[in-house]
Amino acid sequence: MNTQATFEAFLAQWPREMRASMAANSSPAQVLAALNKESLSPQDFMALLSPAAAPYLEQMAQRARALTLRHFGRAVNLFTPIYVSDYCTNHCRYCGFNTNNKQPRRHLTPDEAFIEAQAIAEMGIQHILVLTGEAPKLSSPAYIGEVCQRIKPLFASVGIEVYSLTEDDYRMLRGKGVDSFTMFQETYNAELYGWLHPKGPKHDYAWRLETPTRAARAGLRSVGIGALLGLDEFIQDAFCTGLHGYWLRHSFPQVDVALSVPRMCPHEGAFEVKHAVDDRQFVQYICALRCFLPRASITVSTREKPSMRDHLIPIGVTRVSAGVSTAVGGRKLEADNAGQFDISDHRSLAEMCAAIEGLGYQPVIKDWEACESE
């Protein structure tokens, strides 16, 4: 694929009506054929997501587990987020950071962020993910870069999950010690996306859609994507997420593609989840992703309960968070601000490591570190 092309153009080859028809017309024979292939096409991926695959969930799980062991062994990487600012100018209907939500807000100075990061480093965490709301006057690219540069000596790897930036911004952040990037498209339904984000910079669907491409072109080592499950019909966003990962892997073979599978959960404010994803669909999705993108890492966050995360690790999950707080200053500093969302797994790093070991897997605190030349 041409790295100058856009994912939007590639996605346009798979319009919504076609995706729905593919799902509805998938057959058991197509599902079984997909489970016996070494390399899957997008059509095969859709078959594994379709209702026709539901009776074969056990076979899918076995195939996913075998692929995960082949490409990742028994290693499960651990990380934790650090929220440094929850001020936001967006009006996202489903998010606790929505500017209309009347709640205490907090913005850490780089020195305060360092204090918070020290508390995380003392836990033993070596991979950290820096998050902010979208308030560029406060959380500017320069501010994000200053925070990342300040905390980088404490960690082997610093990633970001912030608002959409330019390619030059990502290149600047790479120079400040950032090596990985995560951004959820939220939903790949452009019309629904516009309704969900009625005001604010995030309203621009196309700009956000191409953000992972800009991060990859800027030379970041790892690019993470995902849809927020529950906003649109499950199969639609599940398929588009896998398709996005497929396009990124073929367009940027030097980049590690990471997939996150967040489900909607309670937050500050009120939002009706019209397309809730049940546990069986959720497991089917992860199995299908592993079969379609066997070398991509898959992250399941603390949005999920401990029992669900433990169940998924042997199937296909290769990255989990631990010791999580979604509040700004939620570890070392006094935090009276609400978190972005309610978490369901409150286990510490030690407890998470023990759980992983109990499953027969190896918790990995550090699996990569940037060299000075990078």
Image (cartoon, helix red, strand yellow):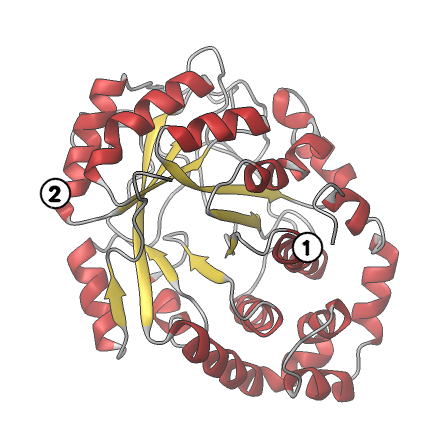
Residue most extreme to the top:
137
> From the image, which quarter does the N terminus lie in?
bottom right
Mark 1 vs 2, N-terminal side = 2
- Asked if residue 187 shows in the view, the reply is yes
Q: Amino acid at mark 1?
A: Trp
- Asked if residue 139 shows in the view, the reply is no
* Residue drawn at point x = 54 percent, y = 53 percent: 254
Marker disc for residue 202: none
Q: Position of residue 362 (x, y in %)?
A: 25, 71
Query: Looking at this view, is 364 or 58 the one in front?
Result: 364
Marker disc for residue 247: 1
Label 1 to label 2: alpha-carbon separation: 38 Å
Image position of 285 with respect to 169: above or below:
below
Q: Taking 51 as reference, is 332 left or right?
A: left
> From the image, which quarter does the C terminus lie in?
top left
Badge 2 is on which residue? 122
Query: Looking at this view, is 151 or 134 the one in front?
Result: 151
Image position of 216 with respect to 352: above or below:
above
Badge 2 local density, few (<14 within 10 Å), some, or many (20+)? few
Q: Position of residue 226 (x, y in %)?
A: 56, 50
Query: Looking at this view, is 28 or 160 the one in front?
Result: 160
* CB within 8 Å, label 1 to label 2: no
Badge 1 local density, few (<14 within 10 Å), some, or many (20+)? many
Q: Taking 58 as reference, is 29 left or right?
A: right
For the residue labelled by badge 2, is the local secondary structure a helix, a strand or a loop?
helix
